[in-house]
């Protein structure tokens, strides 16, 4: 495995009295697509969100253990949480464009971080809309409401908005589950291209998609990390009986 971008040590998450993740220990490889698999309710989304300190936004949550990014535990006291969330971006399951224009959606993050020059913002907007595969479709209506876009276009807009603050890691939570097949294919193609510059961690419940996308695989079951490794090994030679059963489609 290549050098890790994130190292997770003894990570636990509980919502009030219910423990959702138990003692997770794993390294997330850099510049690869890591896919998190597991049946519904096993903690996939919680695990994903814990890597950017988004899990704690839920009332009553407790997180303990370490998530080490750039040599520092993001859960250590005095951590710049805003800085963590800028460098480790999250793309949600359903697109949520801001109630403003296409242009302003992409420019929102850079403006928040102090960029004001129009020429610089223009360059960022075009660059990230191109990266998200949306530029040619919207270049002549950048100041139209983002809400007028199709769902698939909105998801690519949200991807462009996330990229505009220049994160190093992209967390993707079932980002194609609400999309039609063509829109899903476009998002997949973008992510496969983006892994040259970003470390990507994605949750999916679709095994076919996981096989297409994954370089590295994590399999969760009832809040525990059962197995992890290179995609070829996990899919073709799974070690644990639960992993074998899940990949064989015996449960979801």
Image (cartoon, rainbow, N blue to C red):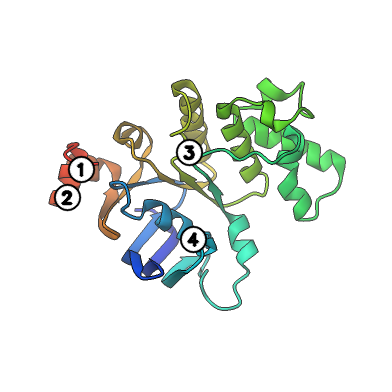
Residue 224 picture quarter:
bottom left
Of residue 75 and residue 168, the one placed in the foreground of this image is 75
Kindly indicate the quadrant of the structure image that contains residue 206: top left
Residue matched to label 3: 175
Instruction: Give the CA separation, mark 2 to mark 4.
Output: 26 Å
Q: CA distance from mark 4 to mark 1?
A: 26 Å
Q: Are marks 1 and 2 in contact (CB under 8 Å)?
A: yes
- Element class at badge 4: helix
Residue beneath disc 1? 246
Q: Say which element carries label 2.
A: helix
Q: Which residue is mark 4?
A: 55
Question: Is residue 36 positioned above or below 186 on the image?
Answer: below
Q: Do we see residue 239 in this rendering?
A: no
Q: Residue at x 37, y 41 (%)?
A: 204
Q: Residues within 10 Å of mark 4 (few under 14, many from 20)?
A: many
Q: Is residue 87 left or right of residue 187?
A: right
Q: Nearer the viewer, mark 2 or mark 4?
A: 4
Q: Quadrant of the C terminus?
A: top left
Check disc 2 and report the residue beneath it.
242
Query: Which comes before the other along the chain, label 4 or label 3?
Result: 4
Q: At which x and y percent is residue 196?
A: 51, 41
Query: Whole-percent x and y of residue 208?
Result: 31, 31
Estimate the spatial distance between the alpha carbons at disc 2 and disc 3, rounded to whole Å. Answer: 25 Å
Between discs 4 and 1, the one toward the N terminus: 4
Q: Quote the CA–CA distance across marks 1 and 2.
A: 6 Å
């Amino acid at each position: 495995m290549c050098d890790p971008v994130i190292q997770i040590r003894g990570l636990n998450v509980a919502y009030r009295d219910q423990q959702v993740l138990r003692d997770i220990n794993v390294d997330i490889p850099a510049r690869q697509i890591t896919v998190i698999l597991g049946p519904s309710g096993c903690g996939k989304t919680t695990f994903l969100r814990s890597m950017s300190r988004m899990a704690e936004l839920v009332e009553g949550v407790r997180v303990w253990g370490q998530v080490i990014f750039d040599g520092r535990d993001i859960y250590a006291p005095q951590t710049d949480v805003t800085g963590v969330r800028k460098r480790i971006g999250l793309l949600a399951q359903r697109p949520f464009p801001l109630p403003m224009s296409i242009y302003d959606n992409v420019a929102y993050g850079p403006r928040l971080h102090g960029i004001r020059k129009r020429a610089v913002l223009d360059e960022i907007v075009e660059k990230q809309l191109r990266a998200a595969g949306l530029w040619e479709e919207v270049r002549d209506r950048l100041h139209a409401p983002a809400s007028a876009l199709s769902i698939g276009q909105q998801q690519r807009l949200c991807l462009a908005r996330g990229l505009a603050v220049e994160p190093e890691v992209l967390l993707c939570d079932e980002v194609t589950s609400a999309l039609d097949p063509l829109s899903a294919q476009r998002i997949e193609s973008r992510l496969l291209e983006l892994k040259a510059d970003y470390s990507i961690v994605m949750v999916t419940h679709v095994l076919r998609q996981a096989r297409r996308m994954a370089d590295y695989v994590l399999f969760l079951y009832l809040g525990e990390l059962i197995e992890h490794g290179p995609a070829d090994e996990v899919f073709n030679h799974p070690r644990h009986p639960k992993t074998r059963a899940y990949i064989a489609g015996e449960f979801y």
